[in-house]
Image (cartoon, coloured by chain):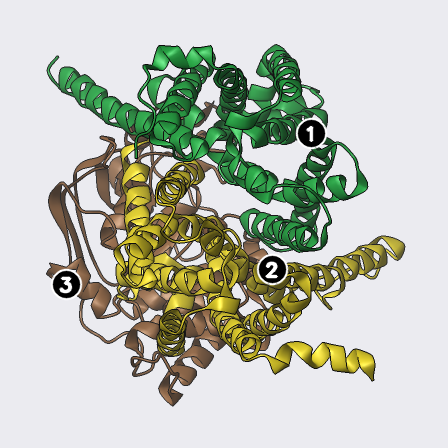
Amino acid sequence: MNLYTEPWWELFGYEFMREALVVGVVVAAMAAVLSCFLILKGWSLMGDAVSHAVLPGIVLASMLGLPLAVGAFVAGLGCAVASGFVKRHSRLKEDTVLGVIFTGMFGLGLVLYSKAPTVLHLDHILFGNILGVSRAQVWQTALIGVGVLSVVLARRRDLLLLCFDERHARALALPATALHYLLLSVLALVIVVSLQAVGLLLVVAMLITPGATARLWTDSFDWMLVVAVVVAVVSSVSGIFISYYVSGSTAACVVLVQAAIFLLSLMGSRWRARRFRGARRVP
Amino acid sequence: MTTSFHHSTGDLRLEVSGLGVVYANGHRALSGASFSLTGGTICGLVGPNGSGKSTLFKSMMGFVRPSAGVVTINGGPVREALKAQVVAYVPQAEEVDWDFPVSVWDVVLMGRYGAMNFLRRARLSDRLAVEESLRRVSLWEFRDRQIGELSGGQKKRVFLARALAQGGRLILLDEPFTGVDVQTEEAIIVLLRELRTSGCIIVVSTHNLGSVPEFCDQAVLLNKTVLACGPTASVFTEQNLTAAFGGVLRHFHFERSTIQSHDGRSVKIMTDDERPLVFGKDGHLEYKDREGRESLIDERRRRETEAER
Amino acid sequence: MGMWHDLLVPLQYDYMVRAVVVSGLIGVVCGFLSAFVTLKGWSLLGDALSHAVVPGVALAGLLGWPLAAGAFLTGVLATGAMALIKVKSRLREDAVMGIVFTTFFAAGLLIISLTPGGVDRKTIIFGNILAIADRELLQVVVIAVVTLVVLGCKWRDLMLFCFDATQARTLGLPVVVLHGLLLVLMSATVVAALQAVGAVLVVAMLVTPGAAAHLLTDRFGRMMWVAAGLGGGCALVGAYASYFFDGATGGCIVTLQALVFGVVFLWAPRHGWLAERRRARGRSGSGKAQEVRL
């Protein structure tokens, strides 16, 4: 099974590997920063929903000859906006509404795909294809990544307040609605960019696990950002290497490494808590 | 008023002894809490937020495993009392999903589930119990309404009716008077007094201090443990309340009435914002009206005349 | 005449008739259950379960077990893992679910990608009711019948559990058992629905009919029947229509369900958006026409 025996450092000699690593690191960093906000806002399901909802946008865009990213972005944001609307005007719970709308959009995407005379690879959209990125995609990812990171990090205090206490944010006359949509747009954008790397079925893992892992390590939000990014980048790089050696799905490997780090952190935090409590009991 | 399927007679006894509860995250919610109640009585459970009121409720319903001590109902464990339909719970309004597609009738009928057969099909006796309970809280006309379509007071009464239909004899009410108009509050109190007469123990958790002396015979003052318990008048002293609430309460001292200079009486008011608790000069409790307090007034007069002699 | 003839073409094929009937059955069972799932607020749990069964299906395919057995095993494992992490960490429930189900799902995808001869990825992700094997068909029917019988006997208890678990407990009902029962029923139907619509879209079968039914009625019993009818009807028609859509059965069924939900959301007589707007306009238009609430 194991066809690849060269040592890992020699892999840097391959062009496709270098590009994959660049994309992997940028995507991981972006998703990790965002995951810290999503964890605190309780938007895990929102990440899941938006990531599935981009499918019809991609298929339609490819049918109409538009850039795929534009279609995906519009559809993802559309899902979030539509869910908010239905939630406000019905007696249904938010998770129910999200479930109805994102599955409906994903189903619609599949139906459209069955009728679309496109060269689209459904597999690549769903599962990612990081080892086959083009030079243009690397540049696109890097540019969007830098843009997203600088906007989010610059406004991180406002966004944090929005996640922590939206009413307080409104009371302070912060543009809460604008911030809300900023966060949603960033979410949709990150998902669009991550499709190439991990595919839309596993993007949501990148948007939850790093933030949750960091939450176990620290109570300070700034440190949470740092830890989340480190965890995500490490898992991304090692996941790419592992998937190369076992010739398995890259996205799955990245997500599993993240999960392993989460599990270790959880055990570590339990151990620390026990030691701390033990120390406190004996004054 | 009471019928055969309702509260069977015989003294109900609730005993909490040395109760301690520690949650999984290490938080110690209660320790060494002890008190006992014998039916019929209405007991106010009073304490600031986080004092362990809801933990005590959960212990009485057998939801938390005590780390120390025990709760017994009629001498047996809580689990047996639950099986025998002795414990009824009236939740806070916020705990209920008011959009749930059930009618008033459905909710009250649910109170009978524990006594129904495997398929939970309502028998005639169940229907009669539901009807009588609904009539007692004057909601019979509303039986087909979806529960979300009721007013705040009616919503509260639906869950009281459920407790009635269940025939519970230890009735736990969680903040029954929040979001309820004065009329409903009085109606609820009348109903609770009827239940007391039939031998039930009614435990009312509330942060609304002022209402407790109005209708509770006994009070349990809670802050991580039982600070005081017994007849309301003896529990509700300034020292006890200050010990339980610390700086949470507002104190107002009126050494002399500000309006009528000839009136020598001075009062002291303690409040946590809703209905104030009023103490007389020598530390006795003041009530809203004299009706029903004749014995107290007589006793006070007698003591005053004795003191004058 | 020609159009009618075209429309009847799918029913000339045995495999289509079989797929339509089985989908309908799965739709009815999921519909019944969706009434509980939406009211209990377990939509995300349904999503999590449907992803968590994937490694089980992949392993079962490798080892030659019945797919349902493997799926059920990992479904239960994932539920246990969620409960454990929830207790051991201070993370929010939705985050814990997200972590666990993506991990299980990733493990499933990795197993599939490592074993090219095993179960087809497309079958698991999108279902393949048109080519369902007899053995799987039997599993689906057994699951459906057992679920319907259990729901028929215990729906009142489960309703009380969803509405007010505290009350259920004070009545002496075995709440832990009811909780487990609902989870088991969900896992079982997820396994059955996997065949029809695939792992990604199972959650729609468990949420959308219930959501639509909740907007149409104020009684739980009626809501269950409406949800079952909608679920079954959409599954029947969707499976039939998939003949014209390149065999995208899951996509067709779920799209149809979402369309029906959209119609209901807009035009439901009392709880629809238009009814709400009409009421709001009536209220602001004439100050006296306020709802009288006693």
In the image, what residue occupies the spot 55% across and 27% down?
A132
Q: Which residue is mark 1?
A: A181
Determine whether B277 is above or below B42 in the image. Answer: above
Amino acid under disc 1: Tyr
State the CA–CA distance, disc 1 to disc 2.
Answer: 34 Å
Determine whether A190 is above or below B189 in the image. Answer: above
Amino acid under disc 3: Asn
x, y (%) of residue B277? 43, 37
In the image, what residue occupies the spot 46% across and 16% down?
A229
Specify whether C74 is left or right of B136: left
The chain letter under disc 3 is B
Please tell me the numbered disc located at residue C248: 2
State the CA–CA distance, disc 1 to disc 3.
Answer: 59 Å
In the image, what residue occupies the spot 58% across and 68% down?
B146
| Front residue (pair B117, B284) | B117
Q: Are marks 2 and 3 on the same chain?
A: no
Q: Which chain is yellow?
A: C
State the CA–CA distance, disc 2 to disc 3.
Answer: 63 Å
Please name the color used to draw chain A. Answer: green
Q: Which residue is mark 3?
A: B74
Q: Secondary structure at mark 2?
A: loop
| Front residue (pair A142, A47) | A142
| Structural crowding at the residue carrying mark 2, measured as other residues with C-alpha within 10 Å and reported as few (<14), some (14–19) or many (≥20) | many
Q: Residue reaching furthest bottom? A: B124
Q: Residue reaching furthest front? A: A3
| Front residue (pair C126, A263) | C126
x, y (%) of residue C186? 40, 61
Determine whether A86 is above or below B170 in the image. Answer: above
